[in-house]
Image (spheres, helix red, strand yellow):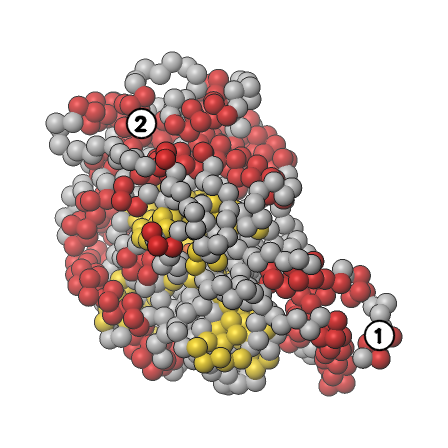
Amino acid sequence: MKGFRARKLDPIYLFPTEELPVAVNYLKKLLPFLTEGLCNKCNKLLLNRVDLLDQELSYQDPQPVQVPDVHCYEPTSSPANEDIDKYAYIPDECCGKKDESDTHSIGSWNNGEKGDCGSDTHSIGSWKNGEKGDCHFDTRSAGNWKDGEKGECHSDTHSIGSWNNGEKGDCDSDTQSIGSWKDGENGRLEPFVYKSELEVSTTSEASNVRMSWADMAQENGRLEPVVYKSELEVSTTSEAPNVRKSWADIARKNGGLEPVVYKSELEVSTTSEAPNVRMSWADMAQEEEDELQEYENSQQQSCDPGGVGSQEKKKPELSRETREYIRFMNVQRKKDFVCLERIKGKTVNVLEGLELHAGVFSAAEQKRIVDFVFELQEKGSRGELKERTYTAPQKWMRGKGRVTIQFGCCYNYAPDRKGNPPGILRNEHVDPIPNLLKVMIRRLVKWHVLPASCVPDSCIVNIYDEGDCIPPHIDNHDFIRPFCTVSFLSECDIVFGSNLKIVGPGEFSGSAAIPLPVGSVLVLQGNGADVAKHCVPAVPCKRISITFRKMDEGKCPLGFVPEPDLLGIQPLPYESDESNVLTVQVKSLISAKQRPVTRDGGNSNLSEKREGILGRAPTDDLGSHSEPRQTIQGTHSDNDGSHVEPWGRARGTLSDNGSSHSEPRLTTRGAHSEPRLAAQTARGTSQSEARQTAEGASHSEPQETSQETHSEPRPASIGTPQSEPRQTPRRTPWSQQTNRPREAHSEPQETSQETHSEPRRASLGTPQSDPRQTPRRTPWSQQTNRPREAHSEPQQTSQETHSEPRPASIGTPQSEPRQTPRRTPWSQHTYRPREAHSEPQQTSQETHSEPRPASTGTPQSEPLQTPRRTPWSQQTFRPRARRSVDR
Ligand SMILES: O=C(O)CCC(=O)C(=O)O
Ligand SMILES: [Fe+2]
């Protein structure tokens, strides 16, 4: 302690005192890096210094560490405690609570060969460095260091910046972690983002590409007719998949978007492989009379002269009711997600119950909502919201999590220092749901996104800065199902699986990665909500999500009064037959609209070629796109391409096109078109039955079981090269995702590796040589459903495996030494069956090795440090490759 005090002038003391505990904690966690390559002496010296700091801190603040409260931090009375509160220090020790839930860790680091956590682990900065550091029970750790051979965790884990860095750092559980290690440039909500967006949007080249809602949104109200025109043009082109550039795409560049980028997007967008259906929504975004616009008008009558408001003041030709109905009918709904896992000997579609709805919020609406969220954030940061409403992580801390703003109830994602369990804190109060968000709720119910029986009465706004994440978790059952989350600003993946793994700081791998398009609504229920955990790995650029949930009646905050204007919401009538006047009217309007326009001036029947945000659209009429929830179930089991189930046809198309893809998984492809039935059968059989199985088993089962559990059967034909050497997870685009069963047992050994090499998005068009340290995203508009060039990547089988189709035009140099994850457009994702058991190692690994979208086109030899993502359209639910992050 003496020596320590003598070093009081060390730079470490430039830190505010209250920040030291976290700094020291991080230092401890970073020790493996800091000491790597050092001689013993230096190593010891460094260790001693950190240790001294630690001792000093203990001396200064003997407070016990607290559990991280990811979404809802405990208020504290002192700055020092505040830090602790927010980052939840918990002793890293097994406390014997084997309730398969909630591991709360901050910066935990499993560094052993097997870093599996089989239980409820609450750790902060725990460091498992041994070969076995197994803990199959509730472990609460803070900054501990375990030298075990296995540090396994099979449970609900809430971690902040946790990092499993061992060869097997499996966490098959609910992990609530805040954060990736990132430079907490917190709250970079500078207006210039918008400015740059605006700049871009006004460039001539950009205008044509911007047909997405997001594109329009960035116009900040200046929705020039030409934009709509171009949107329409684009949308009618047959192949141009993606013109949609999100604000975030632009925003992330912080103003640095070169026109050439847009140009290339345009080029891509005009290529004709994938039509863009979104223009219809965009067109409809002009709905000045819709609810959101009305809200806008009522809230800011004086704002935006010449902007969206005035633009849209043009006299609508149709009644508001008709226009709303058109929009409603154009909502694209994907409800057939499939990712099979083997749980307790049964095959379970862990994505059963998930739905993705696109086109629910127009670009203009998104813009309003995002602006409103930023206003809320500012209010919160100024202390103008209730204490528990607004929570912002400390800016100086990497992996600090994200800003959260809660309404309706205070939700404790993890036990807090007061000992409150996860769930709704009935004695805490937050602000009521703002009007605009209530408008959103009404939209969600009216448009059949959420059932009228489940009108949300609470919500949480998540504001992710680049690098922020939400760790694996299952939403607490204080909220009933379904619930949903709406995405804004930028697309990102949400990863699902019964056995999610921590791959690195803010990086997680799982069975399936689903891209969340800007403006989309993901509905969670069934297995997708309760068997699979979900997480959002560190986002490549700023993102906002709003999660709407209805509280269980018995769990509402004391004194809670339901919002009167959320009562009695009536869903719009939906009738698939011609008896509904609106339906007829809308259909004729839409078919008229679709017919003529193509970008090149030719005629094209949009209905034949367009591709929706959720994948390739069915070739039939509107009904295909807009079928409400009730149609889903029946549709799943049959693959007849009926328009009740639009995506079945979409998948068929993809399968058919499989041969055209340059990706080497010919077998897989072949398998795609053929085994669909099998897949669906599997799905059908698994859903009801499997859920029960999975419910009890998925979260906390011991390893032996889990091994079997997770080893899924798959059609041999879909074999993914077992030998793939990939180091990091990759994602495959959505549009290529099919509902085929994953391949089981085809993989030789270590599951985990594959596991971690899972879903990724192959990069499109992002310069590989890019010196940036942070992930770049490829503009939506560049995302195409073209097969990526196969074998262009330097390595072996895996390469093949992962070389999925990608837009040739957007080809990214394969040899580039990328450091950060890249994403591939979801339009290329396919849900192919995962390959099971192809991995070389032991059972436990298998246990945790989840299905992953086979990769796509990324060179196996790539020195990636972080997971890469593969475009949606290329995504398949193949078994994940073993974890790629080798130490
Ligand atoms: O940000 C997202 O899309 C997911 C949010 C989420 O999982 C949650 O709020 O529980
Ligand atoms: Fe969630």
Q: x, y percentage for residue 529?
A: 33, 58
The residue singled out by tag 1 in the image is 5
Specify whether 343 is left or right of 439: left
The residue singled out by tag 2 in the image is 324
Specify whether 232 is left or right of 184: left
| Marks 1/2: CA–CA distance | 69 Å
Whether disc 1's CB lies below 8 Å from ligand 1 is answered no
Q: Could you say whether the residue bearing mark 1 is in a helix, strand or loop? A: helix
Of residue 210 and residue 523, the one placed in the foreground of this image is 523
Specify few, some or many for label 2: CA neighbours under 10 Å numbering under 14, 14-19, or 20 or more: many
Q: Quadrant of residue 178?
A: bottom right
Task: Give the mark nearer the N terminus: 1 vs 2.
Answer: 1
Q: x, y percentage for residue 781?
A: 45, 39
Q: Could you say whether the residue bearing mark 2 is in a helix, strand or loop? A: helix
Image quarter of the C terminus: bottom right
Please tell me whether residue 811 is drawn above or below residue 362 in the rendered image: below
Image quarter of the N terminus: bottom right
Whether disc 2's CB lies below 8 Å from ligand 1 is answered no
